[in-house]
Image (cartoon, rainbow, N blue to C red):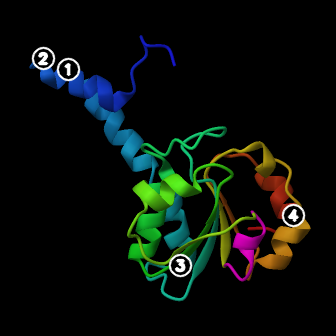
Amino acid sequence: MNPLILPVKASKKIAEAHGYTATLIASVEKVNDAQKLVIAQKTTNRFGEDLTGKTFGLWGLAFKPGTDDMREAPSIYVIKELVKRGAKVKAYDPKAVEKAKECYLNGVDNVTYLESKYEVLKNADALILLTEWKEFRSPDFEEIKSQLISPVIFDGRNQYNAFTLEEKGFE
């Protein structure tokens, strides 16, 4: 990472430490925080506010592909919100599972971590994609459809073409 480019939260803290109120940075942070819950909101719009009895298969825990870095990852916020509403989450990530278990989602009930991207979909109500790992780019959509209770995909990375998914029978 370029040391001259600071993450939003770090920039805000530095400004505050020097007695400066960084209004623009605070606004960016507010927008970023709201974005983290967009997928959870779409999920409740589709399945209702009370998600008791619902299970979601989640692909991608890490903030970005190729790492186990979960700092400020949308998965933390989405999982906590879904679980708070009564859902169960089955999650898969090629690298970040241990970080999730040990740190970021430690103590969060109703989260199961599995070894396969397709295994998390078995009897799940929908797939939620949150990290654009290479292995998620060209999945077997027939396999996905056969595992899910309903053919619903929430693509938090805009990785899949919505028209193509509709042609394949997905919502």
Q: Mark 2: which amino acid?
A: His
Residue 97 occupies quadrant: bottom right
Q: In the picture shown, does residue 39 fall above or below 113?
A: above
Residue 1: horizontal and vertical position, in percent? Answer: 52, 19
Q: Quick check: is 122 in the magenta stretch?
A: yes
Which of the marked residues, 1 or 3, is nearer the chain's N terminus? Answer: 1
The residue mark sitting in front, 2 or 4, is: 2
- Residue under pointer 2: 18
**Please, is residue 21 above or below residue 149 in the view?**
above
Q: In the image, is residue 82 above or below residue 52?
A: above
Q: Which callout, 3 or 4, points at the residue further toward the start of the chain?
A: 3
Kindly identify the residue that appears in the image at 58 percent across and 51 percent down.
96
Give the residue at mark 3.
88
Q: Are marks 1 and 2 in contact (CB under 8 Å)?
A: yes
- Residue at the location (43% across, 16% down)? 5
Q: Is residue 154 visible?
A: yes
Check whether the beta carbons of the residues at disc 3 and disc 4 lie within 8 A of each other: no
Task: State which tag comes first along the sequence, 2 or 4.
Answer: 2
- Mark 4 closeness class: few <14, some 14–19, many ≥20 residues within 10 Å: some
Q: Is residue 19 left or right of residue 86?
A: left
Q: Residue flagged by tag 4: what amino acid is it?
A: Phe
Give the magenta part as a residue range. 117-124
According to the picture, the residue beneath numbered tag 1 turns out to be: 15
Q: Which residue lies furthest to the top in this view?
A: 4
Question: What residue is at 49 percent from the left and 81 percent from the top?
Answer: 51
Q: What residue type is labelled 3?
A: Lys
Q: Residues within 10 Å of mark 3 (few under 14, many from 20)?
A: many
